[in-house]
Image (spheres, rainbow, N blue to C red):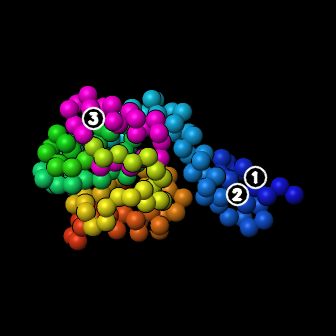
Amino acid sequence: MVDSVVKSNILLNSRKNTLDHQGVLEQNKEFWDQTADKWFGITALPQLGCKIPTEEDLHLFGDVSGKKVLDIGCGSGHSLKYLADRKASELWGLDMSTQQIEATARYLQDCGYEANLFNSPMEEDPGLPSGYFDIVYSIYAIGWTVDLQKTFNLIASYLKKDGIFIFS
């Protein structure tokens, strides 16, 4: 009997009918590494999503000057640049795709910015500081998590007291 089968691109353990988290993470990483260039600059601030008001309409982030920000699923780095242009003091990004992290580093450097970047799934703590960030945000990435509770617990641990988490 086969222990795991692919159903609708989701790896399932056929005996337990449970999600194979590691298999899905590997599949997601492979997808993003292969398609990173196609997504360069797409789904980034000020856009919060498809057919919804933008950050410039909603002002969810408020004044970010002097703020330490962490982008979960930073993609190509365009959202980090958007906040850097608005005087965020520290830029941090996390993405499971090596290609996305490399694109972010190049893009931000070309724009004259530096960021602390981590190549890791959002479900794992790659060594980000606890209680450090004023704002943690994720534009279109949270839907890719294989463990929502663990991801939210980690995000909460990264935030300062009274820090905010924004996601779409």
Q: Nearer the viewer, residue 94 or 83?
A: 94
Which kind of residue does numbered mark 3 sit on?
A: Leu
Say which amino acid is labelled 2.
Leu
Q: Tell me where the magenta segment starts and ends, as one range.
A: 92-114
Q: Taking 63 as reference, is 25 left or right?
A: right
Residue at 57% in and 51% down: 25
* Residue identified by numbered label 1: 5
Q: Which residue is mark 3?
A: 108
Three-letter residue code for mark 1: Val
Residue 12 marker: 2
Residue 32 is a magenta residue = no
Looking at the rendered structure, the secondary structure element under dot 1 is strand
For discs 2 and 3, the disc positioned in front in the rendered view: 3
Residue lying farthest to the right in this orientation: 1
The label shown at residue 83 is: none
> Is 163 located above or below residue 34 in the figure?
below
Residue 143 in view (yes/no): no
* Number of other residues with Cα within 10 Å of mark 2, as a class: few under 14, some 14 to 19, many 20 or more: many
Tell me what residue is drawn at x 35 percent, y 36 percent: 104
In the image, what residue occupies the spot 31% across and 61% down? 129
Residue 149 in the image: x percent, y percent?
Answer: 47, 68
Q: Is residue 76 above or below residue 27?
A: above
Mark 2 element type: strand
Which badge, 2 or 1, is on the more N-terminal residue? 1
Compare marks 2 and 3 and give the one earlier in the sequence.
2
